[in-house]
Amino acid sequence: MSIKFEVLHVCKQSGARLGKLSTPHGVFETPFFMPVGTQATVKTLTPEEIEQVSEGLILGNTYHLWLQPGADLVEKHGGIRGFMKWDGALLTDSGGFQVFSLTDMRKITEEGVHFKHHKNGAALFMSPEDSIRIQEQLGADIIMSFDECPPPYESDIYMKNSVDRTLRWAKRGKNALKTDQALFGIVQGGLNKDLRKYCAEKLIEMDFPGYSIGGLSVGETKHEMYEITKFLNPIMPFDKPRYLMGVGAPDDLVENVINGIDMFDCVLPTRNARHGTAFTTEGKVVIKNQAYETDFRPLDPNLETPISKYSRAYIRHLFKAEEYLGMRLVTYQNLAYLKYLMQEIRKAIKEDRLLDFKAEMKQKTNYFKSK
């Protein structure tokens, strides 16, 4: 098997886990956050910059790379790592999220999913076996089972059928795998705890090297999300990594680490950056606001990075002038902050004080204000 995971310490105060994940392209302390490189690039940053602001793991998107430039071309470059010149570890999703996000352009069948190309309308089809084959070509260290990510408030009957199909697809994908890439099963079931438990237990029987929790942060409240991760914490295998897909707000990272999660990814920090919202040690800063027009302080006074030399006034000017450098600088800041946050979380777990850390963060920042 191509990965190894061990729990090094459990925080006495919170029950959060400190772990070590060994992959063919690096050994990493968990919990950690992975920037999303949808199209074999983390938007606006070079691979050298990504290395500086990540733990050394990033995520690629199977569906989008399958469409453009095509898995064959990526494979000829030696996979995503050779294609984008990335030396670190890599995880790919399965295309299952696009089953959720492209609702109007897809039809789900037992065999797989029929899509319409989101740009030109061409007919496409992806089966669990196709998803695994494409991910083998993309060459990630960790890959995902093809699943349906259902909307959170669907009926119990819909959810039950969806979960059963996701389980059948997980088995088909596992049977199709020809490499030693680490294939994770994905726990679905919406907000229905019985279905979540059922899905988790059936996947555990299949014995995957790691388990993802999908179908959260897709429209439900934060409280509902935390309820599900807290519920699944004692059900998931203790000695295997747990990956919460698509979650990356600073408050969500802290809460879900307390609920036993080891791995995260999300487009939120990079997407927010391109719209002018910065994550800092003091909280969220909307840099376009007029308050920063004559603000000479750095974006984050407490975090020393290559962008600390620029004033808030300058970065605001870049956004007002629609200069791309503004997006680049805030993207760098947001990912640098999340890397710092995860380091601080790991330190707090080691020192058995993660709940104290959360209380301090609540006091000092505005991250915990949203519902």
Image: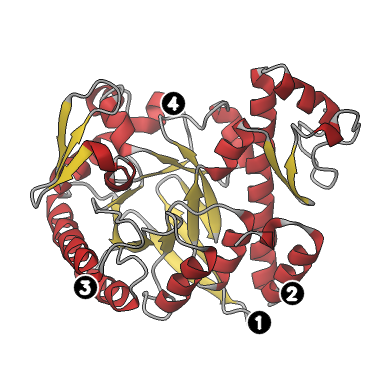
Q: Residue at x 27, y 27 (%)?
A: 67
What mark, if any, has residue 356 been given in the picture? 2
The secondary structure type at the circle numbered 3 is: helix
> In whole angstroms, how far apart are the C-alphas of marks 2 and 1?
9 Å
Residue 13 marker: 1
Distance CA(mark 4)–CA(mark 3): 37 Å
- Whether pointer 2 and pointer 1 mark residues with C-beta atoms closer than 8 Å, the reply is yes
- Residue 84's disc is 4
Type of the residue with mark 1: Gln
> Mark 1 or mark 3: which comes first in sequence?
1
- Of the two numbered discs 4 and 2 on the same chain, state the one appearing first in sequence: 4
**Viewer-side residue, 124 vs 336:** 124
Disc 2 marks which amino acid?
Asp
- Three-letter code, disc 3: Lys
Residue located beneath label 3 in the image: 202
Residue 312 got which mark?
Answer: none
Q: Position of residue 272 (x, y in %)?
A: 60, 39
Badge 4 element: helix
Q: Is residue 253 left or right of residue 115?
A: right
Estimate the spatial distance between the alpha carbons at disc 3 and disc 2, rounded to whole Å: 36 Å
Count of numbered circles in the view: 4
How is this picture coloured? Answer: secondary structure
Neighbourhood count class around disc 3 (C-alpha, 10 Å): few under 14, some 14–19, many 20 upward: some
Q: Residue drawn at (54%, 29%), measured in percent from left and top? A: 47
